[in-house]
Image (tube, grey):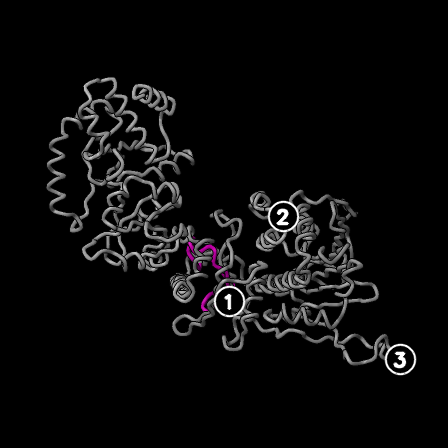
């Protein structure tokens, strides 16, 4: 006997051990999900075999009717879930059941809070359904034989859900997998036919293969009382407990909301209900059915752009692949669902999908359907859409850069805080903003800042507050990048109020404009003195009328890289282009008037440096020389004293 057929005791991978502990202790309030998860895994195994059989029909042999079977033994307190699907080799057993070969494991564990309810939701998102067996079982056995191998090439896996498991060679008459749960003493009531049937019916009606249980007349005598002795010789008779028809192939009117929700949990391995869904059948030049879901919460690996994503692909109701990313763009990676096509080859591969014109057409249509789903959700239920935005808004902001054709549709879905928001939530859309624009306002004004607090206190807002002009406040890390790809909306151009020279167009008062021109001439000499002090650190010094309370601020050129993007590039180790700001001074501020009269050059220089430091803090929240700034400030304060 070779080494890899020997019985072997192995330790769980550290992450698997932690998840086992969490699974056992966090999901006690919803114990019956173990059955849903194990039946779901069995269904997936059948799907995978059906796909493999497309190129190797011998795998099905004389057992072509794929099914799942649920057995129980109330005397011995066991439940068994069996399938005649793809099965596993010894190496696959160790890989799939002893380790968690999924990217982002450490990130997942860091996301855990210690709050059992919240952590149970994370566990569901992570998709470790097999381990849920240990919620109700103190020992689990997995007997499996890979399709295409012989009866003596089976593997038996056993564990008590603690620190280790055993793997040994075994015999199994047919292909597939049987998971046997030895129930805990206080969970023995799960080994009850009536209870199991009701759970299976609730959780498995949407599956496309039958889930079988032994026929039983629940009104007949128990334990063989009054039965004919010959009944013992009869082989058990099984019947399908579920509808056994793929949910997406059924008419929308025949599917209940609960069935849609259960199907979502099956394909996503999420424990929470979806936020919304859209079921659609397309006929004509292309024929396909789609069922798209908006999840209720973001997965922990949402920001890993390399993580598995996409729709579950079926061709003529035959499962082809999980995570077919070709049908939706990356900015919609949070969407879950199924697409079943009649126009794609059964022998399709990921590479072929990328070149198939039918896939391009479906991708375009599915993208629009997903965006329409979101638009409808926003229109019919703003509160629910706000929940969606809080979870997925920043991902959606990637859209205008990635999907030029749909940028207007995406822009309509964006939400922000504004200077007129009642709360700090990002709950205002661009349509809301345009509806409140002043009669002669030609542009959509916005400001990018590090936080809402920093934005609301930014000196660039002062003239807009004075004139009652609403400004959108953008505080997400992606916002400056977003606005680089979103130039206008509904014919209105966007204007970053911290860039270029202030131009309010028709909103400017002509008398004010004349007064501004006069003050600019009067302070030309002061601007030159300040520029001499600041030297090459600034592009130019100019008189501004965007300030009402602050003495000075920084502005950058229209197309220069902003502070937010510079920080992102620095954090990623990229070279950051030098951006020289314009130093703008408020001609009506007492400090500027004082500086204009200051004859002591040392004091003048100190005042300039302090004002420049203040403006830098307001702009980017940081100083090149904090120590020098503090020393100058203290020096001036002592002189004033």
Location of mark 2 (residue): 100
Q: What whole-number distance in Å separates the C-alpha atoms at marks 3 and 2?
A: 50 Å
Please state the extent of the stretch shown in magenta in the rendering: 327-348
Label 1 CA crowd tier, 10 Å (few <14, some 14–19, many 20+): many
Residue 637 is one of the magenta-drawn residues: no
- Would you say 375 lies left or right of 104 here? left
- Picture coordinates of residue 412, whole percent (x, y): 34, 59
In the rendered image, the vertical position of residue 213 relative to residue 128, given as above or below: below
For label 1, the SS is strand
| First in sequence: mark 3 vs mark 2 | 2
For label 2, the SS is loop
- Picture coordinates of residue 315, whole percent (x, y): 51, 67
Q: Is residue 357 visible?
A: no
Location of mark 3 (residue): 229
- Picture coordinates of residue 248, whole percent (x, y): 52, 70
Q: What whole-number distance in Å separates the C-alpha atoms at marks 2 and 1?
A: 29 Å
Location of mark 1 (residue): 315
| First in sequence: mark 2 vs mark 1 | 2
Label 3 CA crowd tier, 10 Å (few <14, some 14–19, many 20+): few
| Residue at the spot 22% in from the left edge and 31% down from the top edge | 590
């Amino acid at each position: 006997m070779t080494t890899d057929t020997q019985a072997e005791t192995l330790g769980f991978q550290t992450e698997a051990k932690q998840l086992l502990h969490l699974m056992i202790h966090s999901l006690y309030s919803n114990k019956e999900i173990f059955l849903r998860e194990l039946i779901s895994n069995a269904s997936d195994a059948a799907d995978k075999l059906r796909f493999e059989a497309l190129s190797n029909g011998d795998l099905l042999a004389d057992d072509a009717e794929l099914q799942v079977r649920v057995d129980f033994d109330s005397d011995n307190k066991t439940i068994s879930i069996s399938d005649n699907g793809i099965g596993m080799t010894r190496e696959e057993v160790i890989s799939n059941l002893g380790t968690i070969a999924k990217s982002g494991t450490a990130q997942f564990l860091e996301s855990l809070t210690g709050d059992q309810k919240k952590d149970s939701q994370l566990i569901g998102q992570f998709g470790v359904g097999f381990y849920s067996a240990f919620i109700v079982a103190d020992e689990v056995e997995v007997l499996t034989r890979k399709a295409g191998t012989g009866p003596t090439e089976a593997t038996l896996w056993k564990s008590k859900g603690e620190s280790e498991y055993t793997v040994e060679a075994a015999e199994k008459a047919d292909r597939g997998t049987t998971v046997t749960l030895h129930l805990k003493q206080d969970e023995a009531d799960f080994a009850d036919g009536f209870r199991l049937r009701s759970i299976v019916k609730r959780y498995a009606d949407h599956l496309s293969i039958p889930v079988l249980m032994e026929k039983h007349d629940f009104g007949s005598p128990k334990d063989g009382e009054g039965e004919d002795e010959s009944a013992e010789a009869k082989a058990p008779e099984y019947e399908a407990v579920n509808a056994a028809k793929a949910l997406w192939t059924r008419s929308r009117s025949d599917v209940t909301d609960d069935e849609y929700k259960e199907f979502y949990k099956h394909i996503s391995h999420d424990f929470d209900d979806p936020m919304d869904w859209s079921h659609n059948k397309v006929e004509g030049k292309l024929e396909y059915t789609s069922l798209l879901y908006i999840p209720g919460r973001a997965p922990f690996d949402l920001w890993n752009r390399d993580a598995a994503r996409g729709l579950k692909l079926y061709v003529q109701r035959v499962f082809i692949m999980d995570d077919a990313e070709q049908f939706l763009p990356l900015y919609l990676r949070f969407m879950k669902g199924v697409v079943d096509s009649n126009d794609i080859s059964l022998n399709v591969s990921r590479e072929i999908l990328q070149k198939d014109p039918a896939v391009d057409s479906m991708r375009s249509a599915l993208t629009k359907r997903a965006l329409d789903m979101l638009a409808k959700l926003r229109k019919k239920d703003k509160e629910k859409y706000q929940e969606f935005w809080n979870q997925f808004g920043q991902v959606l902001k990637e859209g205008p850069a990635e999907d030029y054709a749909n940028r207007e549709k995406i822009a309509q879905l964006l939400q922000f805080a504004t200077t007129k928001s009642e709360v700090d939530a990002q709950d205002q859309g661009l349509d809301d903003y345009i509806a409140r624009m002043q009669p002669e306002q030609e542009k959509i004004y916005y400001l990018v800042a590090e936080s809402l607090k920093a934005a609301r206190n930014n000196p660039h807002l002062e003239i807009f507050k004075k004139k009652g002009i609403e400004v959108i406040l953008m505080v997400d890390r992606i916002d400056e990048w977003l606005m680089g790809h979103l130039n206008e909306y509904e014919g209105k151009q966007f204007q970053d109020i911290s860039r270029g020279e202030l131009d309010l167009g028709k909103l400017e008062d002509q008398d004010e404009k004349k007064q501004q021109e006069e003050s600019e001439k009067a302070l030309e000499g002061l601007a030159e003195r300040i520029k001499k002090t600041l030297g090459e650190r600034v592009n130019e010094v100019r008189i501004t009328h965007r300030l009402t309370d602050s003495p000075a601020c920084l502005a950058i050129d229209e197309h220069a890289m902003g502070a937010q993007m510079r920080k992102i590039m620095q954090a990623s180790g990229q070279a950051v282009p030098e951006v020289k700001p314009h130093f703008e001074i408020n001609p009506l501020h007492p400090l500027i008037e004082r500086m204009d009269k200051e004859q002591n050059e040392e004091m003048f220089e100190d005042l300039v440096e302090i004002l420049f430091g203040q403006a830098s803090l307001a702009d980017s929240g940081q100083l090149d020389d904090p120590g020098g700034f503090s020393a100058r400030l203290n020096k001036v304060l002592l002189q004033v004293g």
